[in-house]
Image (spheres, helix red, strand yellow):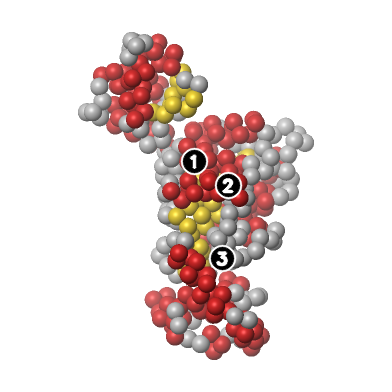
Amino acid sequence: MNYLFNLLALNKIRGLGPVRIRQIISQFEDNQIEKILSEVNLSSILSSSFREEYYQLLKNGLERTIQKEIEFCVNNKIRIIPFWSAEFPHRLKQINDFPILIYVKGEPILNPAKSVAIVGTRKPSPISLQWLEKFMEEIGDEEIQIISGLAYGIDIQAHKNALKLRQSTLAVMGHGLDQIYPRQHAKTSSEMIESNGGLLSEMGTMTNLHPDLFPRRNRIIAALSDAVIVVESKVTGGSMSTAQLAHQYNRDVFAVPTLPNIKSGCNALIKRNTAQLIETGSDFINYMGWNIQTNRTNRMRSNLFDNSLSQEHRQILEIWESNNQEHVSFHFDEIYKKSCIKMSRLPQILLELELKGIIIHTGQKLFQLTSK
């Protein structure tokens, strides 16, 4: 019997839960778990009540169910990672009820240098979306992984902004990875998988959607993060739950203040001292003690010394390098005035820098540096 079969079987016994399963497995040495689980008869290590549940599951086709799940994961490149694996997220193991296994699709870094969860309302105001885009540009750094739940509103916009900035982004799902909810976000999830990000869940495939599963998802979002940022929220709901859990897990929690009585969940978090008030990326960077500006500046200066760049290329890049303006977007007309390059030459030079991946055209004749 494969160890994975018995691990999945334990995970399907109602009422057993991750804490009790780990208590059962804790009698084995870490380097012996897979060998023993491959050989042991589960009924011999279960108490009488759970043994009866296990027998009932076997009668109802447990073996076939698990075999189908393993085959689905193999065919769809979904990895099943047990808690004793070195790849299992170390941040997740810091909470008491961490799952005994996780399902992962894509190749996200599960133990990134820095991780930030961004959550909020499903119906954000345009002001909140503008704030979020600017904030993420200000903290843009390839070392930071952006985590959220792929939900409508703030969640999906955080993922999309991360993709635009070429940051790894991870979605924690409240259901099995055989489906995407909401379906409208399937395209974004595929882009995440293709861009060093991915999807993560503790739920097995064929797990039906149910509201009770999302609080469990929220605890994983909170646990995986160094910091949780709430951008616009009602006083109740998933974002508030994630913030409260993060606070309990000793994660840093931040909230963007709003006008009174307008989705004032963020204000409530600040008043309760559950979250720090945050207004800019600089606020966040300073509080966390992260040296993000320096990383971007070093990349900027390495571009200036790139031997493949012409003097005209460097003239344009020096516009951003001066006065530490790496995060600023410049209009074509402003670049023309500052660079003193002929109008007839400028479009070609900008295109060459774009093809080199150094700048990006964001629309309306605006250009900015890429995050790499």
Q: Is label 3 in a helix, a strand or a loop? A: loop
Residue at the (40%, 16%) spot, across then down: 335
Question: Height in image: 355 above or below 66?
Answer: above
Instruction: Say whether residue 190 is left or right of residue 210.
Output: left
Residue at the (63%, 81%) spot, across then down: 60
Amino acid under disc 2? His
Which residue corresponds to mark 3?
Answer: 205
Q: Is residue 328 visible?
A: no
Amino acid under disc 1? Ala
Mark number for residue 52?
Answer: none
Q: At which x and y percent is residue 89?
A: 47, 60
Q: Is label 1 in a helix, a strand or a loop? A: helix
Residue at the (55%, 49%) spot, across then down: 186
Which residue corresponds to mark 1?
Answer: 162
Question: Height in image: 74 above or below 247?
Answer: below
Which residue corresponds to mark 2?
Answer: 185
Quadrant location, the N terminus: bottom left
Q: At which x and y percent is residue 345?
A: 32, 14
Mark 2 Cα shell of 10 Å, populated few (<14), some (14-19), many (≥20): some
